[in-house]
Amino acid sequence: MKKTVNIVIWTAVLVFLIIGAYFVYSRNNSAEYIEDKIAEDTNNDKAAGDNGGTKEENKIMAPDFSLKDLDGNTVKLSDYRGKIVFLNFWASWCGPCTSEMPEFEKVHRQFSKEDDAVILAVNLTDGFRETEEKARKFIADNGYTMKVLLDTTGSAAKDYGIYSIPTTYVINRDGSIVTYMEGARPGKVLLDIYEKLK
């Protein structure tokens, strides 16, 4: 009897956790949540400006970096000043990372037509679990054309405080951070943010 009660209790707890996780996931992917998050960040900037600083002084600027792309070219984040940048940290062994890649590729192709936004996919190339060869093979096998950068020293991930992947930062045209999102996101979320910022 006691064993049955324990099973029922643990089943109820598990169901509760799954429902809670689904609710949080759905909320974080909704257009309303993204709109509220951008509005909240904007209001925080305004409030900080009202407290003695200017809006410009209270912006958080995205740390610049210099990384090699898959063609061996050196790429800096600051090269994209004037564009909206979606800075995505990922690895090929990460299931949620690879699950969002097909939609990110579609968004990348859409951005390429207008040339005012870009996805930069920063691969956490640690040389052990993730190597340049694995990253390159994953991109080639899937026919992805988005810009992939190799963070072989972990310096970019450190600068952005990355402790879980995928994580995507949204950087405005002036180089300031708009928001960031942890976990896999559908392409629609990126497009909704883009529409708010363009």
Image (cartoon, rainbow, N blue to C red):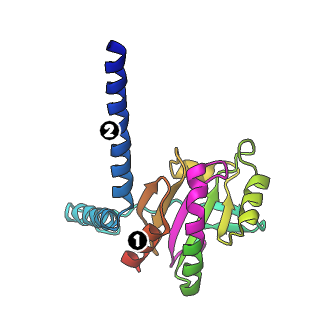
Residue type at the position of mark 1: Ile
Image check: 61 left or right of 16? right
Question: What is the span of residues highlighted in magenta in the rendered image?
Answer: 79-105
Q: Please rate how many residues cluster around mark 1, counting C-alpha atoms within 10 Å: few if below 14, some from 14 to 19, many from 20.
A: some
On the image, the x and y values in percent for residue 131 come to 75, 49
Task: Determine the residue positioned at 32% across, 38% down.
Answer: 16
Does the magenta-highlighted stretch encompass residue 93?
yes
Viewer-nearest residue: 82 or 181: 181
Decide which of tag 1 and tag 2 comes sooner along the chain.
Answer: 2
**Residue 9 higher or lower than 20, as above or below:** above
Residue 150 location (% of width, % of height): 69, 57
Residue 138 is situated, as x and y percent measured from the top left of the image, at 73, 59
Residue 99 shown in magenta: yes
Viewer-closest of 177 and 164 = 164
Q: Is the residue 94 above or below the residue 144 in the image? A: above
Foreground mark, 1 or 2, reads 2
Residue 143 or residue 122, whichever sits in front:
143
For the point 41% across and 81% down, the residue is 198
Q: Tell me: 129 left or right of 193.
A: right
**Label 2 belongs to which residue?**
16
Q: Residue at x 45, y 63 (%)?
A: 61
Q: Secondary structure at mark 1?
A: helix
Mark 2 surroundings within 10 Å by alpha-carbon count, few (fewer than 14), some (14 through 19), many (20 or more): few
How many discs appear?
2
Quadrant of res 148: bottom right
Outermost residue, bottom side: 114
Q: Residue furthest front?
A: 1
Q: Return the residue at label 1.
A: 193
Residue 64 in view in this figure? no
The amino acid beneath tag 2 is Phe
User: How far apart are the alpha carbons under marks 1 and 2?
Assistant: 31 Å
Rendered image quadrant of residue 145? bottom right
